[in-house]
Image: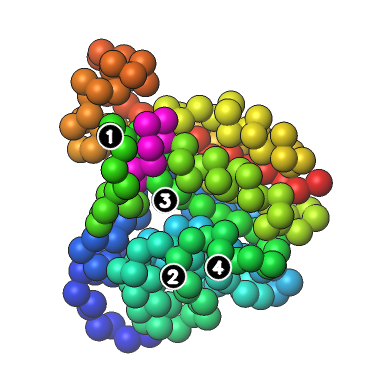
Amino acid sequence: MSSTVLPGALPGGLFALPSVYRPQEDTRLLAAALAREEVGPLTDVLEIGTGTGALALHAARRGAATVTAVDVSWPAVVTARMNALFHRLPLRVLHGDFAERTHGRRFDLIVTNPPYVPAPGTRLPRGAERAWDAGADGRLVIDRICEAAGALLRPGGVLVMVHSGMCGAETTVNRLTGGGLSATVAARASVPWGPVLRSRRAWLERRGLAGADEQREELVVIRARNL
């Protein structure tokens, strides 16, 4: 592989345009969960909200039959396509809503790090905010994925999703179970609050989503299998 350093380079040989979400602790936690899943020449993989394409590329590197990555952000789509080209890995990157762009298709493995940060106000997020803002309870995209998962997964197919404990891990498990999947919390991690949460502390406390002295956020990985 070329040793050329791309503008906006990140560790791991990735790069990101300015408004694209860079891999962080939630990405690493999800990558560890993905590493525990069986991926091979018969596995069709979907990543919802690909960002830099880091997780989709990980699946492609492990020899998945096909890897499809979807994102509503054009900068993310361009970033993921360039990273795939740079690493010479087969990746199909689509722009748009995941449900619309995957209509009629089914997958063996779905991986997703959706927007999950609770956000005040009613306006739709713009720019970089689209990577994390997800409505007043942080579940705007999570709930859509829970609703769609059964139709997107083949029998025996698996969904792995990471989100904040603020969004309610039990709620996610119950919604997936209600949709006919077998779901559990597969992993947990505690990380320091980032700048977005710190800037919303007063609002989060008023909403009952955080305590007055809280300094760390719990991340959860939900694993669900289509029965």
Magenta: main secondary structure equals loop
Q: Looking at the rendered structure, which numbered label has been put on residue 121?
A: 1
Q: CA distance from mark 1 to mark 4?
A: 28 Å
Q: Which residue has dot 4 on it?
A: 101
The amino acid at mark 1 is: Gly
- Magenta residues (range): 132-138
Labels 4 & 2 near each other (Cβ < 8 A): yes
Mark 2 or 3, nearer chain start: 3
Q: CA distance from mark 2 to mark 3?
A: 20 Å
Q: Identify the secondary structure beneath mark 3.
A: helix
Mark 3 or 4, nearer chain start: 3
Mark 4 or 2, nearer chain start: 2
Q: Which residue has dot 3 on it?
A: 27
Q: CA distance from mark 1 to mark 2?
A: 26 Å
The amino acid at mark 2 is: His
Which residue shows up at 28% across the image and 32% down it? Answer: 120
